[in-house]
Amino acid sequence: MAVGRVIAAAMLVVGVWNVPAGAQTYPARPIKVIVPYTPGSPVDVLARTVTQQVSARLGQGIVIDNRPGAGTTIGTKLAATADPDGYTLLVAATSFILSFSLYPHLDYDPLKTFTPVAMLAHAPQVLVIASSVPATTVQEFVDHAKANPGKLNFGYGLGTLPQILGESFKAVTATDIASIPYKGGAQAITDMLGGRIEMNFGTTATLLPLIRQGRIRALAVTTEKRSKDLPEVPTMIESGLPQLALIFSAGLLAPAGTPADIVGRLNAEINEAMKTPELIASMGQLGFEPQYWSPQDYAAFLAEEMRRWPPIVKAAGVKAE
């Protein structure tokens, strides 16, 4: 018996020493999460909602650092050059993938420069028009646009999914609608409410309250099935535009070389936080669908998206400005 206790104790000691040092001590100080979007934008709200819960689970503060601009590449470049120690992370949405096609001379590789940590959420995009536009369906809006060539404006955040969707919409419907770029999508919505923009794409996270208030009008969602938040609004497929059945995604990345044990710890805590009733409810109110992926699943998703999007961007005729 004594020998058995000695062996068990020895095994316990070996097990403790085999645990990576990073897993035992991380995080020892606040974590910075770079959000390459404007404050108040859907991705910013998503990041703040999730990190508040994750911070409590980690027992350490998480600071949001907004770095918008240049189609999200400014903040992304900053994250790419950070130390791979788990203390600087990046929220990467669909624009992170689109930048690969829009900016051919990036000084970072979207797949090689970063390590996937966790997928956070998916969300449908919704086509909305100003309440002053006399249209209640996609076809009526197309007819109105064709009857008023060059008189309508489409607003979007530069280098974002709404830009691709809007330009694709114009291409497949052969409509002459002016494109007005903004630093962030939230600014485009402000100008739509002010009467300077007639068309916009965005997530239900920010547009749903305005739609329900009647301040803007929803014409179609980009998901294959109707949104539970907008059951009366048809899909793009139902509206005759299956080319626009595209969704928004957002996840969390770390600089390449971040220790696997730290990535694993973050992934586990994020996924557990995303499963809590509180966060599920908050995400639902924002129009997001929480996801619970492994780093490997998220990496496979990013690789597939990198193959899928370039032809779409090319067909839309979108170029960085």
Image (spheres, rainbow, N blue to C red):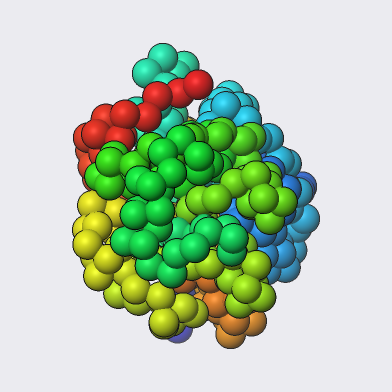
Residue 44 visible in the picture: no
Which picture quadrant has residue 96? top left
Residue nearest the observer in this picture, 295 or 304: 304
Residue 216 visible in the picture: yes
Residue 271 vertical position relative to residue 63 in the rendered view, above or below = below
Q: Residue at x 35, y 53 (%)?
A: 142
Residue nearest the observer in this picture, 274 or 192: 192
Residue nearest the observer in this picture, 24 or 108: 108
Residue 13 vertical position relative to residue 31 in the rendered view, above or below = below
x then y, percent, for residue 61? 77, 55
Q: Residue at x 29, y 54 (%)?
A: 244
Which picture quadrant has residue 68? top right
Residue nearest the observer in this picture, 139 or 293: 139
Residue 119 vertical position relative to residue 204 in the rendered view, above or below = above
Residue 3 vertical position relative to residue 123 in the rendered view, above or below = below
x then y, percent, for residue 64? 73, 48
Q: Quadrant of the N terminus?
A: bottom left
Q: Residue at x 38, y 47 (%)?
A: 147
Q: Residue at x 35, y 46 (%)?
A: 146
